[in-house]
Image (spheres, rainbow, N blue to C red):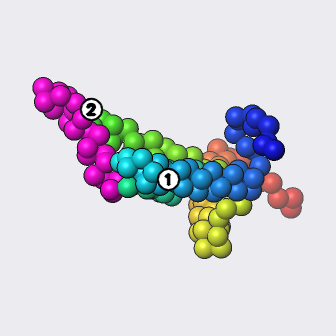
């Protein structure tokens, strides 16, 4: 007896989301392998986790299959367009990965999504926060000293009672 339909939406619980990712990733990799063996098909599968970890399967090597795909997807007259498109695609991919990394870092610095991090990563975040706090305190002290000096220059009455 099978399960009912699963509503396709983001799983909010981090642990459940990670477990589902692992199970479905393994199932997808297994299906790709089975398709390549049973049907003598050339298959390549690339998966990036939300933390940026790469998982891949290639029946004859992922790189070989991607190169074959690129050769079959473009005609010779499109070579210049292909190179330019590929260059822009790579740039967009790099920027997207950097953006996602920065978002993850920001969430971590705000104390969010800390569950999957190990001790070393948590210690690194703690060190970054301590450094930022020290800089903020130093700047606050500097501003307060400047304001006190400004008040003294203007001849403001002393706050001390004599």
Mark 1 near mark 2, Cβ–Cβ under 8 Å? no
Q: Residue at x 80, y 37 (%)?
A: 4
Label ID, residue 158: none
For numbered disc 2, what is the local secondary structure? helix
Disc 1: CA contacts within 10 A as few (<14), some (14-19) or many (>=20):
some
Residue beneath label 1, please? 34
Residue beneath label 2, please? 73
Q: Would residue 40 be visible to someone looking at this image?
A: yes
Q: Nearer the viewer, mark 1 or mark 2?
A: 1
Could you tell me residue 136's position as x and y percent? 63, 57
What quarter of the picture does the N terminus occupy? top right
From what the image shows, is residue 159 above or below residue 83?
below
Please name whichever residue, 112 or 46, is drawn nearer the observer in this view of the structure.
46
From what the image shows, is residue 129 above or below residue 81?
below
Residue 82 counted in the magenta span: yes
Left or right, 147 with reference to 60 = right
What quarter of the picture does the C terminus occupy? bottom right
Left or right, 110 with reference to 96 = right
Could you tell me residue 57's position as x and y percent? 43, 56
For numbered disc 1, what is the local secondary structure? helix
Magenta part, dominant SS: helix
Could you tell me residue 67's position as x and y percent? 26, 46
First along the sequence among labels 1 and 2: 1
Q: Give the farthest residue toward the left.
A: 77
- Magenta segment: 60-83
Please name whichever residue, 155 or 53, is drawn nearer the observer in this view of the structure.
53
Residue 62 counted in the magenta span: yes
From what the image shows, is residue 62 above or below residue 78?
below
Q: How far apart are marks 1 and 2 (CA)?
A: 25 Å
Q: Quadrant of residue 82?
A: top left
Disc 2: CA contacts within 10 A as few (<14), some (14-19) or many (>=20):
few
Could you tell me residue 45's position as x and y percent? 44, 49
């Amino acid at each position: 007896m099978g399960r009912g339909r699963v509503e396709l939406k983001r799983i909010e619980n981090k642990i459940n989301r990670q477990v589902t990712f692992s199970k479905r990733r393994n199932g997808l990799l297994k299906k790709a392998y089975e398709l390549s063996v049973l049907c003598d098909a050339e298959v390549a599968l690339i998966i990036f986790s939300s933390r940026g970890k790469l998982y891949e399967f290639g029946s004859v090597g992922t790189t070989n299959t991607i190169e074959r795909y690129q050769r079959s997807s473009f005609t010779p007259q499109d070579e210049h367009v292909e190179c330019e498109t590929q260059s822009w695609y790579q740039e967009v991919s790099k920027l997207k990965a950097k953006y996602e990394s920065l978002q993850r870092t920001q969430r971590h610095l705000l104390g969010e999504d800390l569950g999957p991090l190990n001790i070393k990563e948590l210690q690194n975040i703690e060190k970054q926060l301590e450094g930022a706090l020290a800089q903020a305190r130093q700047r606050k002290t500097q501003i307060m000293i400047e304001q006190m000096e400004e008040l003294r220059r203007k001849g403001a009455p002393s706050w001390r009672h004599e």
